[in-house]
Image: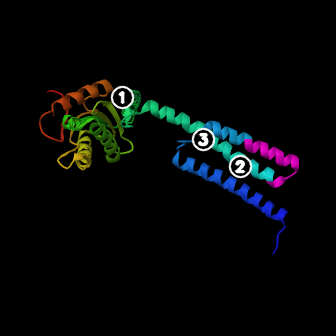
Amino acid sequence: MMFDMDTIFEYIGYAAGLATIIAFAIQTIRILKSKSVTGLSSYMYTMYCLSFICWAAYGVWLEEWTLAATMFIAFLFTFVILLLILYYDEEDKIEKYRRDSLTCAYNKKYFEEVIPSKITEAQIMKKPFSLIITKLNNAEAIRKMGGKYYNRALKQTAKTLEKALRDSDFIARLENDKFAIFLDNSDEKIAKTVFKRVVESMSAVEIIKSSAEKQNLEMLAGICSSKVSGELKDLLHNAEKALNNTAYKGFNKIKVYETKK
């Protein structure tokens, strides 16, 4: 079956239009799945939108309805991508405000903004809650290996904490090698069980400089529960006191703050 040149180029045009639509459709689906617009420029997609709408208008003027329809569909996908870029860029800015730049755990400022409302909600629902303050017991030894190994240890600590804990738990980096964990619907017994699970996960992580110089992540922790206090300030203070009482008493130790009778 023979085709003349006009027919061949007509089909090439169809293929080009279809390929354009598919390309932008795939990009749209990828963004929706990953919720990431890294590397995509809002300025470039604005120009794509203008370009496709102009081509669509040109197709209408020529009464080339296939060209007009193809470019209009491509414009719709591109416009959706542009909206997603603007939306997720704003979300990224909010997340950067909330997150610690090194570990990507929530930062202290955001922790202090969010936890009071979680405490209030738990009190209304009459559910227990606990606060754990944990730190690297061998931070100095890791720091002596070099700054990059210390930073790696902090990143691994945050990452391992997030994997070991529940979705409802809230983790934040307070300062240096110290992290806070708010446990929803958890009394002291549950908090201790959670920390044991954390220790198991942490002990499997090695920071290696050489075969002769490596460190596992060792943790100390202090706990204060809602049985003792219902205010964030007091929870932090008491958990810190409990944490300080674990110092120099061995590796992977935890202490629960208790009021003196």
**Can you give x and y, in whole percent of width and height, for residue 76 in the image?**
70, 46
- Which element type, helix, strand or loop, lies under badge 2? helix
Name the residue that disc number 1 marks: 108
Name the residue that disc number 3 marks: 84
The amino acid type found where label 1 is placed reads: Lys
Instruction: Specify whether 85 is left or right of 208.
Output: right
> Relative to the observer, which residue lies in front, 28 or 121?
28
Identify which residue is drawn at 76% across, 52% down: 70
Instruction: Specify whether 170 is left or right of 13.
Output: left
Mark nearer the N terminus (1 vs 3): 3
15 to 196, vertically: above or below: below
- Which element type, helix, strand or loop, lies under badge 1? helix
**Can you give x and y, in whole percent of width and height, for residue 224 in the image?**
25, 32
Q: Quadrant of the N terminus?
A: bottom right
> Looking at the image, what colour scheme do you see?
rainbow
115 to 38, vertically: above or below: above
Q: Label 1: how many residues lie within 10 Å, few (<14), some (14-19) or many (20+)?
A: some
Magenta segment range? 51-66
Count numbered badges in the picture. 3
The amino acid type found where label 3 is placed reads: Leu
Task: Answer with the quarter of the image where residue 13 lies.
Answer: bottom right
Task: Answer with the quarter of the image where residue 157 lies.
Answer: top left
- Give the main secondary structure, helix, strand or loop, of the magenta stretch: helix
Name the residue that disc number 2 marks: 74
Q: Nearer the viewer, mark 1 or mark 3?
A: 3
> Relative to the observer, which residue lies in front, 24 or 190?
24
Mark nearer the N terminus (2 vs 3): 2
Identify which residue is drawn at 36% across, 40% down: 169
